[in-house]
Amino acid sequence: MIQKRVCILTLGVGSGHLRASEAVQRALRDSSDPVEVKVIDALDSARRWFHWLYVDPYWWMLRNAPWLWRNLFERRQRKQHRSTAPHWVFRRGCREVLRQVKSFAPQLVIVTEIGAAEIAALGRREGWFNAPILAVQTDFQTEPPWVQTEIDAYCVASEEARAQLIGWGVSPNRVLLCGIPVDAAFALPFDDKELKQALGLDPRRPVVLVMGGGMGPVPLDRMVASLELCGSPLQVLAVAGHDAALRRRLEFLKGKVAVDLHIFGWTDNVPELMAVSDLLVTKPGGLTAAEALTAGLPMVLTHPIPGPEERHVRYLEQKGVALHAETLNDIPRLASRLLATPEELAGMRRRAREWSRPDAAHAIAQVAVALLEKATYIDLLATPPPRSGESAYLM
């Protein structure tokens, strides 16, 4: 049997897009047919000036002028702009990325980030490859630049996102509600007692997990320090990721704040950390929120990125799985309220599991396999390329 090739193209401005890509990659490798899957992060091969022009201004705005980023985001939504940057920026800045895709010669391209979707659409339009494109979204709402003629199908996280794409002209039969792809480990029934013992935790005391997500300036050390105002003997698990400076600041807090603080750098054990926790305090990234839903973990959300993550806050509050801490002082107040009312916490945990999509990655893999089979059939028939605006793979 000929092994089929799938390229997953992302743009790693945050860890969530990479985690989603890896979850889909694992699900495809678990599929019945042999599939060779290659994940390409466009930032690894893009020209240096592409970082300066496309990525660095975004980070600068988040750190120094979040109001400016919010205005740009809202304008893009309102005006329904179909691009995050001029086409020449992707054409010239990501030429090596397109060469890598062409060299791999995939039968399917999956994109997991909005800029990656534009790169893939440009690549197919300009003849770098002629495979169908599947867009996998990692937010609960979407944006107009996702709407590209060359994209054959969309896997979205919510009915709201589906309705937005349809409202912008995408055919309803091309938009499938699958959820955000997360590692299957988040749905595992861990032994709580054994996990707490392995982590050195007291089973009688509440556990709060504090994470900052992979994007945006989040004062994780100040968030942890604020939790001593809860007044109860909390155990706090703080995940610093790759941020060495943040980890040093957290280490400095040990013994100086009235919580039992456990510090982690970059770790693959987040499913276990969520399993032993009673509450998650985090920035509302799409992947982190989806992981928490799958783990049935209530959330206190803080420091959202202006625009998309503010919409996440509203979405998750409406579903009854999270509360919004608008200021640092709100974090201990809301945490204390939830930890003191087990019935409210239990209700949030139940609703989180109800709204979760633990099978999202495998649902997306099924869509991908269907597109692969359709693409192979079309290639065998040597069907002429579709007219502008049509998809040969979903007709």
Image: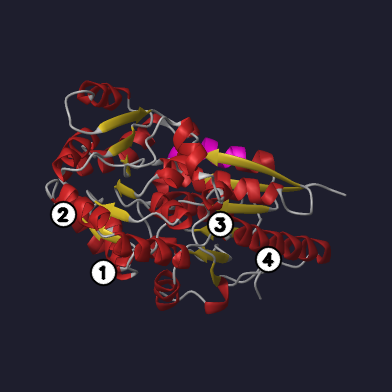
Residue ID for mark 4: 385
Residue located 13% across and 42% down the image? 229
Q: Amino acid at mark 2?
A: Glu
- Tell which tag, 1 or 4, sits nearer the viewer: 1
Q: CB under 8 Å between callouts 2 and 3? A: no
Front one among 53 and 251? 251
Q: Is label 3 in a helix, a strand or a loop? A: helix
Per the image, the residue denoted by label 3 is 125
Question: Dot 4, how many residues are within 10 Å of its Cα: few (below 14), some (14-19), or many (20+)?
Answer: few
Q: Residues within 10 Å of mark 1 (few under 14, many from 20)?
A: few
Q: Tell me, yes or no, whether the highlighted magenta stretch contains residue 132.
A: no
In this picture, which residue range is highlighted in magenta? 93-100
For label 2, the residue is 326
In the image, 18 versus 250, the foreground residue is: 250
Q: Earlier in the sequence, mark 2 or mark 3?
A: 3
Amino acid type, callout 3? Arg
- What residue is shown at x 43% (from left), y 51% (from top)? 287
Q: CA distance from mark 1 to mark 2?
A: 25 Å
Report, in whole angstroms, how far the alpha carbon at label 1 lies from the one at label 4: 33 Å
Check whether the beta carbons of the residues at disc 3 and disc 1 lie within 8 A of each other. Answer: no
Q: Is residue 274 left or right of residue 121?
A: left
* Quadrant location, the C terminus: bottom right
Q: Tell me the kind of residue under disc 4.
A: Pro
Give the x, y percent position of residue 247: 30, 25
